[in-house]
Structure formats: C-alpha cells, structure tokens
C-alpha cells in the first residue's frame, strides 16, 4: 500500500471507531489478537502464553488472527471493532494517533530496535557514509524500514536522495544476493535468513545507533481500556509471563511457534537462530545478565515522533502521553 492509501485507510478507521466499539468482548473471555504478518517466530511470547496456559489461567480464550496488510491492517480491524488487541511496532502507534485513531500501547514486547541496513561482508559497507551512491533494496516507500533508513541517513548528515532506493516488496534479500542491490534495509531476522541463504557473513549498519523506532508493542483501543480494563489487565499479565518464559526458554519458544506454523519444523534450527538473535539483541541485560523488561513510558516517544515528523512519516505531533499507558503492567 502506498502512502496515500495508508492515510486514506487510517482516516476511514478514525471515522468508524466510535461506532465499532459498541461490540463487547464475549462473556466466555474470548478475545482476538491480530498480527500484521503471517505466523513467525517473532510472535513467540504470545504463542508461549497460549501454549503454557497463561491466557487460560486468566479466564481468557484467545484467538490469533493475521493480516497481509501489515500494521495498517491491524489498526483497521481494531478500529472496526473486530479485534480487541494488536501487535505492531511503535511507529504504527504514532502514525495511528497522528490520524486520530484511538489506540494505546499497553505493553512493550521486543525492547530494542532491531532494524538495520545489511550487506555482504565483501562489499565493505559498514557505516551510513558507505551508502552514498549505492542501490538499497527496501520493501516500499511507506514502510517503517524505509522511515528508519531515512532517519539513519539524516542523522549522519546524508540526504535520502544520495542513495538509490529500490522498492522491491518482499524480494529485498534475493535482490541483494543476486547483486542487483548493494545493500538492503530490513529487520534482524531477515539478516539471519540472508546469511543462511547466501552462506556468508553479512555486514550491518545498526539502526539502534540512530533511533529507537522499531521497538514493538501490544496495543488496544481507548474504548477497550475504558469499558473492559480487567480484560486488558488479564491479557497483559498473561502475555508478560509468556514474554519472560520465551526469553528464558528459547527452545520451548520455538516449539510453541511451530504449533501455529507446522511447516516451520523443517527449518527449526533457522527459527531457533532467529529467536536467539532477537533475544540477544532485543533486550537489555542487568549486571547479572538477566533481561530487563521496560514499561511503555520508558521509551523515547518524543524523539520518535520528532524523527518521524522530520522525514514526513507524520504531518502533525500530539501529546506523547497519549501513545501509551503503564497501568496494566504487572508489578
């Protein structure tokens, strides 16, 4: 979907949202969580929470749904009252709020930004300046990885026009490995997959050195919080248990994922490498090496919003306190 399509979709959502939430969650505790992509190991915390009975312990009957429309599709379904919870990146929440969609982040899942620009080691591309004049494979013009790439360049004093973006949809890895692009912008798991396919090491320019955009969140609607706070609290509590368990037990996290994507069994080792990579890079550690789970307010929301405004991803700014709430995080 192009930028105009995204904006139109979100504005339609905003008009629907008040009517949509006259629908109450089912009395049997049935709620739906929607993801922006097909099943993958990155959703392991939720799969573990289901497999280990954490949702059931809270009296919840959780259904997982997927959309091929990415985070915009998730926002659309929440706005239409068809799902109670969504999972997406922080940028989706900021864009939604900028277009008056009443969504709120209630829980931080992947704690750190895992985006970057990757390339075959032999090309010796190791810093933003090395991207000048290069062809960079990107999924599209109106997606978070492109926004992050723009921020990386601008933060280094480089205009986006100094690179040649190639918008190739889902073919970012194959485009690079075939030699048609000098590098590709992507999420960490795609770097791991590229290394597996290409059989060689990949260089990385980590976006986390330039922005925090890319952290992921569980979110819901303002009306859900107002009308069903106990359900939100129970869902967050169970998800937190799933998150902590999946980080501490990666083998079991992958097994829980495979229950929802049985074809993944054939590539179990690859999925385990991906999840281990996400755990290693996606979570800060305390002095004893234990992962730190930050609450939503412990994020640089103002900086994210400023950066997205500066690159044109949003056209207005709002009170950053409206992006999140900490009230449902287990103490």
Image (cartoon, helix red, strand yellow):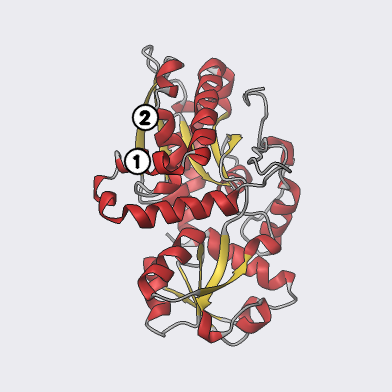
Q: Is residue 161 above or below residue 73?
A: below
Mark 2 or mark 1: name the one nearer the start of the chain: 2
Q: CA distance from mark 2 to mark 1?
A: 9 Å
Does residue 40 appear anywhere in the picture? yes
Image coordinates of residue 150 in percent, x first then y, are 63, 69
* 96 or 201, nearer to the observer: 201
Image coordinates of residue 3 in percent, x first then y, are 50, 61
In which image quadrant can residue 132 be found? bottom right
Does the CB distance between marks 2 and 1 fall below 8 Å? yes
Q: Is residue 26 above or below residue 301?
A: above
Indicate the secondary structure of the residue bearing disc 2. Answer: helix
Q: Check the picture and name the quadrant holding the N terminus.
A: bottom left
| Residue found farthest to the top | 27
Q: Is residue 202 above or below residue 11?
A: below
Image coordinates of residue 36 in percent, x first then y, are 42, 47
| Residue found farthest to the front | 288
Image coordinates of residue 207 in percent, x first then y, are 63, 63
Q: Residue at x 45, y 57 (%)?
A: 5
For label 2, the residue is 51
For label 1, the residue is 255
Task: Please give the label number shown on residue 146.
Answer: none
Q: Nearer the viewer, mark 2 or mark 1?
A: 1
Q: Residue at x 70, y 63 (%)?
A: 209
**Badge 2: few (under 14), some or many (20 or more) residues near its Cα, within 10 Å?**
some
Indicate the secondary structure of the residue bearing disc 1. Answer: helix
Does residue 81 appear anywhere in the picture? no
């Amino acid at each position: 979907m192009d930028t105009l399509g995204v904006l139109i979709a979100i504005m339609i959502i905003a008009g629907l949202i008040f009517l949509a939430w006259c629908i109450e969650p089912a009395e049997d505790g049935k709620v739906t969580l929607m993801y922006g992509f097909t099943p993958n190991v990155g959703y392991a915390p939720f799969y573990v929470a289901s497999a280990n009975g954490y949702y059931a312990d809270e009296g919840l009957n959780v259904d997982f749904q997927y959309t091929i429309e990415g985070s915009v599709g998730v926002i659309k379904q929440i706005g239409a009252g068809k799902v109670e919870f969504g999972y997406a990146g922080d940028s989706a929440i900021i864009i939604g709020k900028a277009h008056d969609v009443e969504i709120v982040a209630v829980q931080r899942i992947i704690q750190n930004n895992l985006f970057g620009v990757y390339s075959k080691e032999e090309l010796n591309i190791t810093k933003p300046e090395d991207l000048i004049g290069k062809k960079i494979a990107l999924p599209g013009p109106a997606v978070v990885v492109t926004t992050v790439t723009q921020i990386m360049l601008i933060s280094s004093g480089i205009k986006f026009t100094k690179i040649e973006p190639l918008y190739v949809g889902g073919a970012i890895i194959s485009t690079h490995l075939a030699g048609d692009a000098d590098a590709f912008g992507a999420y960490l798991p795609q770097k791991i997959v590229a290394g597996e396919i290409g059989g060689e090491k990949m260089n990385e320019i980590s976006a986390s050195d330039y922005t925090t955009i890319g952290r992921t969140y569980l979110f819901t609607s303002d009306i859900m919080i107002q009308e069903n706070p106990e359900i939100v609290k129970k869902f967050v509590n169970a998800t937190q248990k799933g998150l902590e368990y999946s980080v501490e037990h990666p083998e079991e996290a992958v097994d829980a994922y495979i229950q929802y994507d049985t074809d993944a069994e054939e590539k179990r080792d690859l999925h385990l490498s991906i999840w281990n990579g996400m755990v290693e890079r996606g979570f800060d550690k305390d002095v004893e090496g234990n992962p730190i789970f930050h609450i939503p307010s412990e994020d640089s929301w103002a900086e994210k919003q400023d950066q997205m405004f500066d690159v044109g991803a949003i056209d207005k700014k709002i009170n950053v306190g409206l992006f999140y709430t900490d009230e449902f995080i287990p103490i």
